[in-house]
Every structure is written in C-alpha cells, then in structure tokens.
Image (spheres, rainbow, N blue to C red):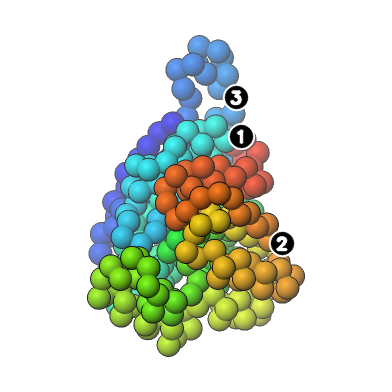
C-alpha cells in the first residue's frame, strides 16, 4: 500500500489544500508469493473511493482512526481523503467545497495518479458532516459519482442548532452561523433531491448505515426512505453503536463490501 500526502493550490478554495491518497501496491508477501497480477498493467487504473471526514476533523482522520488502508489494500481500491474543514462540503464564504470535491479534485488527481476516470468506477462516502456532504454532492453531481455511502450522516441542521446534546452545545459560533445559512438556503438534501430529479442519470445508488444509539438516526433513515420512495436503489443498515469512530471503523467495511469492486485494476 502506498500512502501519499498531496498538497496543491485549489482555485475553487482559493488556497493550498491537502489530501491523502491510498494506492494499493505490491506487498513483500505478495512479491514472495508471486502474486502481482492484480496491480497495474499498461493502461489500467484503480477504482476510487472519495472519503469525507466529519465536523471538527481533517483529511487525516480516516487514516488515524480506522483501518481504511488495510481495507483498501484488501480490495485493490484507491481511496482519496480530502480536507473539507467545517464546510459541510458546500459553497461557503471560505471556498466552494462542493465544486472542489465534485469537479476540481477528481480532475486534478486523475491526471497525476492512476485513478479511473469512468463514473462507474468513482465512488463517494463520508461520516457525519461528510455523510451529508457525500449525499449532497452525489445528488447534485450524478454524472460524477455512481455510488454513495453515508455513515451517521447529518440531515437536520435545525435540530442540531436547537438540540440539547453536547454536540449542539459545544458547536463553535462560525459553525452555527454556517448551519443557520444552510437552513435558509438550498443547501439541504431535500432540495438536492428535488433538483436531481432533473438529471438524466437515474442510477446513483446509496448505502446508509447508522448506530442504533446515534443522534442522527431518525433523520437520516427518514431521508433514506424518501430516496426509496423516489425510486432510488438504497440499502439501509442499523447496527449496535453510537456516533463514534468505533462504529465508523467497523462499518466502512460494509460500505466497501457493497461497492461493485473488481478487486483488480480496471481499464480507465
């Protein structure tokens, strides 16, 4: 497995930004076993998962808190983990994060790394704020990502702001102002769903997973049911757990298992 930290200037964000890229590669044991046939040959590339972090996190969250590198290696899957700050992966005052994730980042990375450029080989997922971001981006850009995984995704911004949980009470002021703007704007999943009905691409697939003790479980499962009512291919999973890395480390494996992976390189 190759782990690469990439820093480059983003025109969408108007600043330098970082991502971690995981690329499966030949291990010493595979070399000794003569098992190198699943890695790059001429004109082949990797299927790719764009994996988003949650609130108060950063681009290295997934590598620090989960075994995502091992899961990617086992499935011959490239994983891109960008920095989304506390943006909600939307167009905010500090940058257009939706354009960055949906357009600029794939276009840039696919020119310098062996990542497939085909929609059917490009996936997106995220946890909490990243689950919201992945859903919103997948719906608004259905020509970019074919599969979307949502772990403990946030849907109800009003409930977050007005709630009594420690998560709500400890929210920093700039984040509160941002969520307030989301409530009053088109930055919600139901708007994205209505707008996406105009798309000619109708086969985006979704996987929702949430702990049975998660503060967002009711809202995210209600949204999953709405997608089902609209005719989307949706899988839902509720398992024992809460809104934490123990749950996300365990169930990102289910998201990866659900993806249509070849466990090998693909034609670009």
Q: Nearer the viewer, mark 2 or mark 3?
A: 2
Marks 2 and 1, Cα distance to the nearest angstrom? 25 Å
For the point 52% across and 18% down, the residue is: 30
Let me know if residue 68 appears in the view.
Answer: yes
For the point 71% across and 62% down, the residue is: 233
Answer with mark 2 or mark 1, whichever residue precedes in sequence. 2
Residue 219 position in % (x across, y down)? 55, 70
Residue count near mark 3 (Cα–Cα under 10 Å), binned few <14, some 14–19, many ≥20: few
Which element carries disc 1, helix, strand or loop?
Answer: loop
Marks 3 and 1, Cα distance to the nearest angstrom? 8 Å
Residue farthest along the top direction in this orientation: 32
Residue 62 position in % (x across, y down)? 40, 46
Marks 2 and 3, Cα distance to the nearest angstrom? 33 Å
Which element carries disc 2, helix, strand or loop?
Answer: strand
The residue pinned by badge 1 equals 264
In the image, residue 93 sits, relative to residue 85, either above or below, namely below
The residue pinned by badge 2 equals 233
């Amino acid at each position: 497995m190759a782990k690469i930290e990439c820093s480059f200037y983003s025109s969408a964000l108007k600043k330098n930004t970082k991502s971690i890229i995981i690329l499966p590669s030949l291990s010493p044991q595979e070399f000794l076993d003569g098992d190198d046939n699943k890695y790059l040959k001429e004109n082949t590339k990797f299927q790719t998962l764009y994996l988003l972090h949650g609130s108060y996190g950063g681009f290295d969250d997934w590598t620090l808190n989960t075994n995502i590198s091992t899961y990617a290696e086992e499935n011959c899957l490239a994983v891109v983990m960008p920095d989304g700050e506390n943006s909600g992966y939307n167009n905010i005052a500090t940058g257009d994060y939706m354009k960055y994730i949906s357009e600029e980042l794939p276009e840039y990375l696919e020119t310098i790394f062996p990542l497939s450029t085909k929609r059917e080989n490009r996936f997106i997922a995220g946890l909490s704020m990243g689950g919201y971001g992945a859903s919103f981006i997948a719906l608004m850009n259905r020509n970019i990502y074919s599969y979307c995984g949502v772990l403990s995704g946030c849907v109800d911004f009003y409930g977050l702001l007005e709630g009594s949980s420690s998560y709500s009470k400890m929210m920093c002021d700039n984040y509160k102002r941002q969520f307030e703007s989301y409530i009053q704007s088109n930055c919600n999943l139901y708007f994205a769903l209505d707008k996406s009905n105009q798309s000619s691409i109708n086969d985006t697939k979704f996987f929702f997973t949430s702990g049975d003790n998660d503060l967002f479980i009711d809202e995210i499962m209600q949204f999953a049911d709405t997608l089902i009512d609209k005719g989307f291919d949706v899988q839902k999973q509720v398992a024992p757990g809460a809104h934490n890395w123990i749950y996300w480390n365990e169930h990102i494996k289910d998201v990866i298992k659900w993806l249509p992976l070849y466990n090998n390189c693909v034609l670009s």
